[in-house]
Amino acid sequence: MSKDFNFEEIGKRTPFRTPEGFFERMQAETLKRAAEEKRRKKLFRLRVGFSAAMAVAAMICGFVFFSAPDSELPSPENPAEWVAQLNGDAIDLYIQDLTDEELEEWVEFSENDIYYELTTQNSDEDED
């Protein structure tokens, strides 16, 4: 390897130069990036805060609207026993809220319900 460079000739001078206004541009760009980063962090905090507030509001709405009973009728655990215990007015209220598909299922269930057949047979025997 040959030496093309004589460092003693150069002395303390540096052979490299910076462009005009390099340090001013560098400082301005660094400040600009820092401001953008600060703005991003602030927007992120706002988004997280807004999301948390919406989640809390949804939970409150859920507790308020879904914890209240929909009607006066108790919810059936065993539908056959529940319907048997209802009086005529309560059955009418229950039937009013059913859709056509639910009514068809109820009729099919009633036609195939052994408990219903036994109770109707017993009531017929009691009348005789």
Image (tube, rainbow, N blue to C red):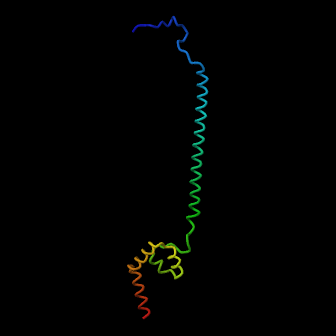
| Horizontal side of residue 52 vs 101, given as left or right | right
| Horizontal side of residue 30 vs 106, given as left or right | right
Q: Quadrant of the C terminus?
A: bottom left
Quadrant in which residue 104 is drawn: bottom left
Nearest the camera: 81 or 42? 42
**Residue 119 location in percent, x, y?**
42, 85
- Image label count: 0
**Residue 85 location in percent, x, y?**
49, 80
Quadrant in which residue 78 is drawn: bottom left
Against 118, residue 11 (above or below) is above
Q: Quadrant of the N terminus?
A: top left
Q: What residue lies at 55% left-to-right and 72% top-to-bottom?
A: 71
Q: What residue lies at 42% left-to-right and 90% top-to-bottom?
A: 124
**Residue 40 location in percent, x, y?**
58, 39
Q: What residue lies at 57% left-to-right and 57% top-to-bottom?
A: 58
**Residue 37 location in percent, x, y?**
58, 36
Against 72, residue 34 (above or below) is above
Quadrant in which residue 32 is drawn: top right
Q: What residue lies at 41% left-to-right and 7% top-to-bottom?
A: 2
